[in-house]
């Protein structure tokens, strides 16, 4: 089955260019000129991945991404934000909204196709994969939820991806740059201090659950996740 890509952009010329490039790469394309049209397409013909323009009239791409992430039916859809906004704050805001990757306009079709394939590899799950247990935490892979005592932990999209990565890779130290590559993606250019900010947020959430020892600082290197020594 070909990869099904939804292109959401208010500029017809960009939609046409993307349809042409992705079709040549043997991908199926769907298009929408605004957020409302995108929601209708997603409801009728669920895509595998969304290419989402940030600046659109009416509901912006950022607002649409928030809405998709807040809905259990669409929270796991991979999203690549397409934008001309290039500051680090813009990139961080886009990722914290729930976008999985971020690509600046103008971009080459080859780079975009490579990003699509890379993101689909990162977000793919194995059919039949069972929930993973780490101490008092349980990762429900298919529902993209992390639970404790059968209650879902409320996490922002980036915090979810970070904690999911740790649960999948326990008892090993990772540097900040390694975490950026694995959680944010190697093509997303944000500073390493961004990792520290999100680690603090996840630790605060876990602290409220009395699980704050799960994420340990490895002095001079980075972080390690282990539920073995937690109370």
Image: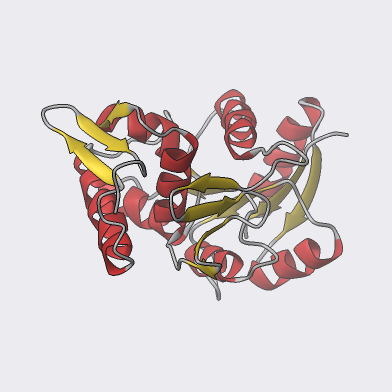
Q: Name the spot of residue 134 as percent of width and height, x first.
A: 46, 46
Residue 127, by quadrant, is top right
Camera-side residue of 185 and 4: 185
Q: Name the spot of residue 133 as percent of width and height, x first.
A: 53, 47
Vertical side of 217 occupied by 208: above or below: below
Residue for point 31% across, 47% down? 214
Left or right: where 58 falls relative to 125:
left
Camera-side residue of 24 and 120: 120
Left or right: where 7 falls relative to 108:
right
Most distant residue in the left direction: 220
Camera-side residue of 29 and 47: 47
Vertical side of 195 occupied by 26: above or below: above
- Residue 44 in sight here: yes
Residue for point 25% across, 36% down? 223
Residue 204, by quadrant, is bottom left
Q: Quadrant of the C terminus?
A: bottom left
- Please count the marks in the image: 0
Camera-side residue of 148 and 56: 148
Left or right: where 179 falls relative to 33:
left
Residue for point 33% across, 66% down? 209
């Amino acid at each position: 089955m070909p990869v099904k890509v939804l292109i959401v952009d208010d500029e017809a010329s960009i939609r046409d260019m993307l349809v042409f490039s992705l079709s040549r790469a043997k991908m199926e394309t769907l298009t929408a000129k605004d957020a409302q049209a995108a929601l209708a397409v997603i409801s009728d013909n669920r895509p595998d991945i969304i290419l989402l323009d940030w600046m659109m009239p009416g509901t912006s791409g950022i607002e649409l991404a928030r809405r998709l992430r807040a809905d259990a039916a669409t929270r796991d859809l991979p999203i690549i934000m397409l934008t001309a906004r290039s500051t680090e704050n813009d990139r961080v805001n886009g990722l914290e909204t729930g976008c999985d990757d971020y690509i600046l306009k103008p971009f080459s079709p080859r780079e975009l196709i490579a990003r699509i394939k890379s993101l689909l590899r990162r977000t793919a799950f194995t059919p039949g994969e069972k929930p993973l247990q780490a101490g008092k935490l349980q990762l429900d892979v298919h529902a993209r939820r992390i639970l404790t005592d059968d209650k879902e932990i409320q996490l922002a999209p980036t915090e979810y991806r970070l904690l999911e990565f740790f649960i999948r890779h326990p008892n090993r130290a990772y540097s900040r740059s390694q975490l950026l590559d694995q959680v944010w993606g190697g093509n997303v250019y944000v500073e390493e201090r961004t990792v520290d900010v999100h680690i603090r947020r996840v630790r605060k959430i876990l602290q409220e659950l009395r699980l704050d020892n799960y994420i340990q600082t490895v002095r001079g290197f980075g972080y390690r996740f282990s539920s073995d020594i937690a109370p």
